[in-house]
Amino acid sequence: MSQQLKQLARKVARVVVPPPAPLPRLPRNEPPVLGHRPGIDRIDYGLNFEQSMEWSPRFTATVGDRRHHIFFLCGHPRSGTHWMDNVLNRHPRVLIDGEYRFESLRRAYDDITGKFWHAAFKEPMRSEAERCFEDAVCRIVGSSSQRKPGATWLGDRTPRSLNVFLKGAPHFLIIRDPRDVLVSWTHQELKNAGHHYTTGNFEPELGKYREEFLNDPTFFKKNPEALLSNERWVKTLAGRWRNHLRLDLAMLMKIDAGELNNGVPARVHVVRYEMIHSDPEGERRRMYAFLGLNESEAEPLTEESRSKPGLKAEDPHHIYRKGQVGDWEKHFTPDVRLWFKEQANDTLCELGYAQDGNW
Amino acid sequence: MAKSVLPRPVREALRPFAARVGLALPLADAEVETAPQEDPEVLLELSRPSVNPWTVNIRGRERRFFFLSGCWRSGTHWVARVLNLHPAMSIVGEFHFNHLLAALARFTATDGAVGGWYQGHRPFLQDIATESIHTMIRRCVYAATCKRRAAMWMGDHSPRYLEAALPGAPNVLVVRDGRDVLVSQSFHSLRARRIDWFRPSFRSFAGKYIAEFQANPEAFKDTTRGFLTEETWVRAQVRDWAAQIRHDLEARKRMESEGTPVHMVRYEALHRDFDRQRAALYRFFNLDPSLALPPSEETKTLPGFRTEALTSDNRKGIVGDWMNYFDERVRAIYLEEAGDVLIELGYEKDLNW
């Protein structure tokens, strides 16, 4: 009986509290990937527009007699993907309908084609699987076209790592100061008892703050130092952000190498959250141009469409919380700075958000 | 043997003679058809089957899909080879479509904890995603099996959890005594080429055993050496086998109630009563057993192997080998973790073995 109970407990434990996913092992001292700096370095990587369009049969969905091209908008969670979505949707020829999260299908495709003892590791099965995966993505995104029949570009907005699912397709990669990401992310995780809060078993350590926050949305406005007061929490999120960005930067380098140099055929436009705050019109003009669209057709940015920088009123419980640049300074105590630097200062500096460790 | 020793051009030259004595398929059956994506007509039929999700009609000929699964080291390869003796069967491995099926379940999940906020939970997208995955399965299996033109049944064999890869398509489930599975897996793992194929908790001892095995395979006939001496290994293997069997038995009931036929083959029964069991297999597919080629050592279709080959994927192929390797400690772990499953499968009457 006790054995059965033990087995049941193990089963329940597996279902209710799955163990946290191991962090990808990455070298700590790898050289900077591209030395990207806001406003200084390039913002476009990989193929140019014409080269990309040569691949367009691979990222085109045909619905009736209409043809729609597919693009992707990705980035770390809480980096402004929703906002970019709203900005892009102001153009009558662009539609982003939401998060498709193709990663699970992609991982399965990678698995069935990635091991030498699997039948789809070999040709022609590998090509069959690849074309089927691409067709699936095109058909699924293409099915949103009826919501905006004039749209020539249909997009998937998923907060995820940069990974190319359709060869040659355009991608927007949004990057935000990770310290602001941490503040925004923590608000959302505490509000929803999110993935990291649950899987990392943070309830015993952060449960009291969560309860205060749920009872009083302004709790962390009144107690800004409490938001990031848990060392394990800060280090976990900072480490995950770093790993995510290292993978993004590595993929950016592969895309930039291009197909001929064993790279990945695609094109990427990097958008900085902070830049679109300071120059929204200039940034969105470049974004439309990246898709070959004329900016003059786009609707103006408005508060109602949540496409303007910042939000009229702060709502700490909402997915659109505040939308500010530099909010982190209120919440980063000397301890938090130290914990963050230990985990991710190299990548923070590489992205140009700090010069060194003296911040 | 011939397949592994002779180069392909030589094998092809010898094929007509080998076919005459039943050792190979006739040339007409072995011709390569074009891959689906090179033929729009085939592509369309595989994407939108005109008959049902597991039956396509290509240029007037019906071709049907089926699947063979079971726990690892349970004889899925052997049963696949036996099925391939019939000219109407063409089965290849291993596609491991369970990864696709799990991903599809996540993509279309309506449960908020899994991802109900994704777009994929919308009913029309669930349909598109499901159709797309079914198309991928049909196209992959077709591309791999269409070489045998005479074959009406096209299948995949993979050691995986039983699930309906294509609703309604026949499934063969192979079940073997988990104790023999444990012994077989413990030898099979000694042949691993990479240490990162193992779970992190096994890597420390796995590396040591693999190196020792490469130096002297025969030494591992000694029951005090190898993976079976590691409790964490034994416990995990037994637990995983029991979990799969429990799942497969449940899945079999569910699938059959939903109209997907499942034929269960016992490894031991196939050993004991080979002719009748294989005839039953062919009949499951409405095929005439008398049309199948005879089993042979060359095609590795006969029960067991002539000699024990420790370094081969086909090591021994016997029933009850566990009795040569189990000591009291392994037996106790087995009873604790999966004694009930052995009883449920009828391998033991109680826990006193």
Image: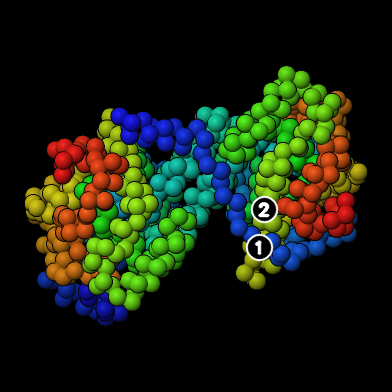
Q: How many marks?
A: 2
Pick whichever, B87 or B115, lies toward us.
B115
| Residue found at x 42% / y 66% | B207
Report in which chain the residue with disc 2 lies.
Answer: A
Which residue was labeled with disc 2? Answer: A243
Question: Disc 2 on helix, strand or loop?
Answer: helix
Which quadrant, please, contains the N terminus of chain A?
Answer: top left
User: x and y percent of residue B115 in the render?
Assistant: 56, 34
Q: Is residue B185 above or below residue B124?
A: below
Q: Quadrant of residue A232?
A: top right
**Number of other residues with Cα within 10 Å of mark 2, as a class: few under 14, some 14 to 19, many 20 or more:** many
User: x and y percent of residue A226 in the render?
Assistant: 78, 32
Labels 2 and 1 touching (C-beta < 8 A): no
Which residue was labeled with disc 1? Answer: A27
Q: Is residue A129 above or below residue B248?
A: below
Farthest top residue? Answer: A215
Q: Nearer the N terminus, badge 2 or badge 1?
A: 1
User: x and y percent of residue B77 in the render?
Assistant: 26, 58
Q: Amino acid at mark 1?
A: Pro
